[in-house]
Image: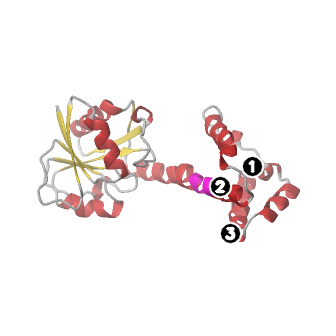
Amino acid sequence: MISVLIVGNGNVGTQLFEAFQSLNNLKVQLISSRNLKNIPAAEITIIAVADDAIGEVSSQISNDFVVHTSGSVPLSGLENSTRKGVFYLLQTFSKDKKVDFTEVPFCLEASTENDLKLLEKLARYLGKKIYHITSEQRKAIHVAAVFANNFTNHMYKIANDICETHQVPFEILHPLIKETAEKIKVLSPSLAQTGPALRKDAETIKNHLFLLSEKQQEIYKIITKSIQNDA
């Protein structure tokens, strides 16, 4: 039985704790990163805190094997004096929405081959998609994920604002959003691209800009130019 300690009760820490807690072959505990005076012993200690707190939190932990869950912090960002690793889950987490861990890529890194195998064993209790990823590769994955998730979600927010301004329910876009996500499973994003920017439809672009706020126009123009430059 693997004993796991999760430090940090944010989105990632909470969801990991709840998932591990449902398994019979794991012993898991969750503590707040603000409560590090009495740290329970564990075979694997997972730090799930904000990136800028990883160094400080890890420096206070003397457990044998300490890993973090960040996509942008390198392995060397851990400041514990014991063994180090990374247990990065490539997914967006919110406390109020359960994640299907069988669909989540686990990006693993460790100082030794044995520790990497231990992290892989832990990951396979929850998921199926296991990758051995270096710190440099993980940085690239993380910035790609920002474009694919965070920036895309901001586009949804703008689309929702436009719908609200014109008294149209945002849910009318749900099928389009779903099809866009499904299409890139069978086509490259380049081949899946459509729309007035790709067609260089100046009249439609002009009409769109007329409907937008000044801030929205600026974003529209930047994205339109990027699409046209890639065509």
Disc number lying in front (1 or 3): 3
- Label 1's element? loop
Q: Quadrant of residue 116?
A: top left
- Label 2's element? helix
Q: Is residue 173 left or right of residue 55?
A: right
- Mark 2 or mark 1: name the one nearer the start of the chain: 2
Residue 158 or residue 80, whichever sits in front: 158
Pointer 1: what residue? 231
Q: Is residue 52 left or right of residue 144?
A: left
Range shown magenta = 152-157
Label number found at residue 215: 3
Q: Is residue 124 above or below residue 220?
A: above
Residue drawn at point x = 85 percent, y = 53 percent: 201
Q: Amino acid at mark 2?
A: Asn
- Mark 2 or mark 3: name the one nearer the start of the chain: 2
- Label 3's element? helix
Q: Quadrant of residue 171?
A: top right
Q: Quadrant of residue 127?
A: top left
Q: Is residue 209 left or right of residue 100?
A: right
Pointer 2: what residue? 160
Residue drawn at point x = 26 percent, y = 31 percent: 23
Residue drawn at point x = 39 percent, y = 30 percent: 128
